Image (tube, rainbow, N blue to C red):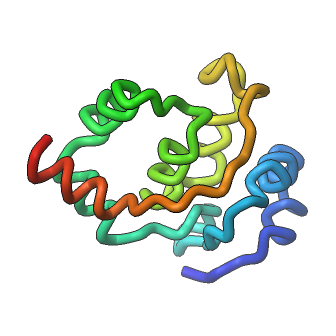
Amino acid sequence: MEVVSRKYASDLEEDYAMMLRVESHHEHVLILDDHGTLRWEKDKEVRALADEIGLNDLIKSFYHLGWDKNSEQYRHLYRCLGYSLSGYWEVFYWDMNHEDADEYIPKRIDWDLKKFLQTYKNFG
């Protein structure tokens, strides 16, 4: 695993360049994994909690709370899961999977994902 710059990722793929311009409001680290795949750096604790709870159940609760694919909470979860940039682009930027992708407005949030997941796990 190797940390890479956003410029490195942007230079590889035009879609990544566009996506990273939009995603410039956060500092989430990009990595090149051992298989040569560009990913958001995984938060191991978040990944373990999400695996234990189940991504489908989490997404249902996000929608129940009014958090859709254009919410920072939803996107932050996917980044912390260590999603590949290509997978992230497909989920959040490809109109075949997200017809409201062009309505996304980047926002900085002060939100503790780990605390949310731990609470969900205990009371969900």
Give coordinates of residue 67: x percent, y percent: 47, 33
Query: What residue appears at the point 30 percent right and 54 percent down from the top-left corner?
Result: 116
Front residue (pair 102, 5): 102
| Residue 62 at x, y percent in the picture | 38, 34
Residue at horizontal 64 percent and vertical 81 percent from the top: 3
Q: Position of residue 97 (x, y in %)?
A: 60, 22
Q: Quadrant of the C terminus?
A: top left
Q: Is residue 37 left or right of residue 102?
A: left
Q: Residue furthest left?
A: 122
Residue lying furthest bottom = 2
Q: Nearer the viewer, residue 30 or 64?
A: 64
Instruction: Identify which residue, 58 or 88, lies in the foreground.
Output: 58
Is residue 57 in view from this perspective? Answer: yes
Q: Residue 30, can we see it?
A: no
Q: Is residue 75 above or below residue 12?
A: above
Query: How many marks on residues?
Result: 0
Residue at 45% of width from left, 27% of height from top? 66
Image quadrant where residue 89 sits = top right
In this picture, residue 76 sits left or right of residue 95: left
Quarter of the image for the N terminus: give it.
Answer: bottom right
Q: Answer with left or right where residue 48 lies relative to residue 103.
A: left
Percent position of residue 49, x then y:
23, 58
Instruction: Give above or below for 55 relative to 34.
Output: above
Q: Residue at x 60, y 45 (%)?
A: 88
**As displayed, is residue 54 above or below residue 13?**
above
